[in-house]
Image (cartoon, helix red, strand yellow):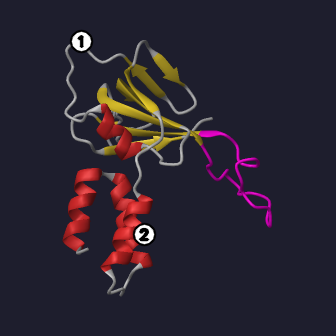
């Protein structure tokens, strides 16, 4: 698999492919066996688990991270569909991945020079992966294995611009 092929995949599939291409480069640097790379890619890039595609039904404020979600304006048509958003922002190991089309304002994402919000009424896909194991701040008890029984049930949220497919930010708060 050539570097150009990996770049094309990265552009077409988004952040998951970017992470995959970095991993492939690290794991198979100098390898002449393209079959190794292809087998690794087939195992690593999987569609997210079960989930939903929906439209934000009402105003929702997430004060922990300064985000407000509104229903998108009537007649809004995103360039990136919900299935693409789930693939771009979902975590394959999640119990479920939901993509929600919304009008997002982030009070914490501000241009420090002008004080103007950068994400102000932006049409986005909020991709929520639930049931994932995320390393807690401060780590875990040394010597203790992380397993599904000792790992908290977290959710990870990725915000993707619904018109461009650009990754905007991610956050966890529960």
Q: Is residue 4 left or right of residue 59?
A: left
Q: Is residue 152 magenta?
A: yes
Q: What are the residue bounds of the magenta stretch?
A: 132-154
Q: Residue at x 31, y 25 (%)?
A: 121
Q: Is residue 148 above or below residue 75?
A: below
Q: Nearer the viewer, residue 75 or 82?
A: 82
Q: Which residue is mark 2?
A: 23
Residue 141: % across, % down: 80, 59
| Structural distance between the alpha carbons of marks 2 and 1 | 41 Å
Q: Which residue is mark 1?
A: 74
Q: Residue at x 32, y 36 (%)?
A: 83
Q: Is residue 78 left or right of residue 32?
A: left
Q: Nearer the viewer, residue 83 or 115?
A: 83
Q: Quadrant of the C terminus?
A: top right
Label 1 Cα neighbours within 10 Å, binned few <14 / some 14-19 / many ≥20: few
Residue 20: % across, % down: 39, 63
Q: Residue at x 44, y 23 (%)?
A: 68
Q: Nearer the viewer, residue 141 or 61?
A: 141
Q: Is residue 1 left or right of residue 151?
A: left
Q: Is residue 140 above or below residue 52?
A: below
Q: Is residue 144 above or below residue 119?
A: below
Kindly report the secondary structure that dominates the magenta region of the rendered protein: loop
């Amino acid at each position: 698999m050539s570097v150009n092929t990996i770049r094309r995949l990265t552009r077409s599939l988004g952040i998951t492919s970017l992470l995959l291409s970095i991993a492939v480069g690290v794991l198979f640097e100098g390898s002449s066996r393209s079959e190794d790379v292809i087998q690794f890619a087939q195992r690593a890039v999987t569609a997210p688990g079960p989930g939903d595609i929906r439209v934000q039904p009402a105003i929702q404020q997430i004060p922990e991270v300064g985000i407000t979600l509104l229903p998108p304006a009537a007649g809004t048509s995103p360039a990136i569909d919900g299935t693409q958003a789930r693939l771009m922002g979902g975590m394959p190991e999640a119990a479920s991945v939901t993509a929600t089309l919304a009008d997002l304002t982030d009070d914490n994402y501000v241009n420090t020079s002008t004080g103007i919000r950068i994400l102000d009424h932006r049409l986005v896909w909020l991709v929520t992966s639930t049931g994932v194991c995320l390393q807690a701040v401060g780590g875990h008890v040394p010597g203790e294995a992380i397993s599904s029984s000792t790992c908290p049930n977290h959710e990870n949220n990725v915000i993707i611009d619904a018109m461009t497919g650009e990754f905007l930010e991610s956050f966890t708060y529960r």
